Image: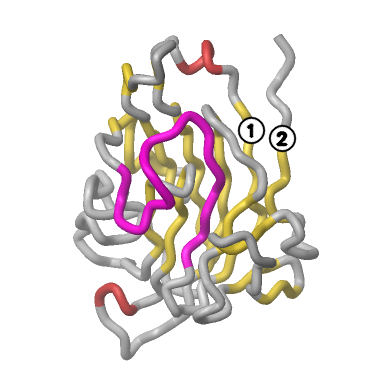
Amino acid sequence: MSAPEKVILFNGENLDNWTTRDGNPAGWVVEDGITTVTARTGDIMTKEVFGDCLLHVEFRIPDMPEAEGQAKGNSGVYIHGRYEVQVLDSYGLEPGKGDCSAVYDCHAPLFNACKPAMEWQTYDIIFRTARFDEAGNVTEKPRLTLLHNGMPVHNNIVLENVTGGAMGDICKEGPLLLQDHGNAVSYRNIYVYRLPEKGLDRY
């Protein structure tokens, strides 16, 4: 079997392959290979959809020393547009379900792997989509493994429910959505490998 194809989701030049939630052109700024949340232009999502996958995202959180909690460099990486992996300045904190690399309000990371604000960070996410029977009933919930800056902060966790702000209910394939939470979080080097379904069924 050949290696899975690498699909570039953000090419560093434009957001032609992205839209807003309602299908309009994405309004975030693109400069020097980086796209940055342009406040209140809305979330952006890929036109590409995927099921089982390995997703790579790089992000940079702005330095907001006067801000606290959820106001401190907030954004989110939504797998399938339904499961938010939180982006937040949580450097040096004891992580909870609302901190960086948490599956928002569902799973806290095993430990804090954050870098300080203004340093580039990485998410590498192995996502096993839900399984359905022939009648369309869910037989297995999705699973997620996450490396944050190369460290395993989630290991094959079950995603029992979609998170707040989800596009819809559980699905077999969906887009990547990046959240506009009003803070100037930047992203670059976003790509996905679509994985063969039977491959992840071994685990």
Magenta span: helix, strand or loop, mainly?
loop
Amino acid type of the residue tagged 1 in the rendering: Tyr
Q: Residue 90's spot in the image, x, y percent?
A: 31, 67
The N terminus lies in which quarter of the figure? top right
Q: Residue 164's spot in the image, x, y percent?
A: 30, 56
74, 171: nearer the viewer: 171
Q: Is residue 103 above or below residue 31?
A: above
Residue 193 tag number: 1
Pick whichever of labels 1 and 2 is earlier in the sequence.
2
Q: In this view, does 155 lie above or below 44?
A: above
Q: Residue at the spot x=65%, y=67% of the render?
A: 26
Label 2 crowd (10 A; few <14 / some 14-19 / many >=20): few
CA gap between label 1 and label 2 equals: 5 Å
Q: In this view, does 91 lie above or below 155?
A: below
Residue 6 tag number: 2
Q: Residue at the spot x=69%, y=67% of the render?
A: 25
Residue 23 tag number: none
**Residue 71's image quarter?**
bottom left
Colouring method of the image: secondary structure
166, 193: nearer the viewer: 166
Q: Residue 176's spot in the image, x, y percent?
A: 55, 48
Q: Residue at the spot x=52%, y=66% of the render?
A: 43
- Give the extent of the magenta segment: 162-179
Q: What element carries label 2?
A: strand
Instruction: Determine whether label 1 and label 2 are within 8 Å by CB.
Output: yes
Amino acid type of the residue tagged 2 in the rendering: Lys
Q: Is residue 4 magenta?
A: no
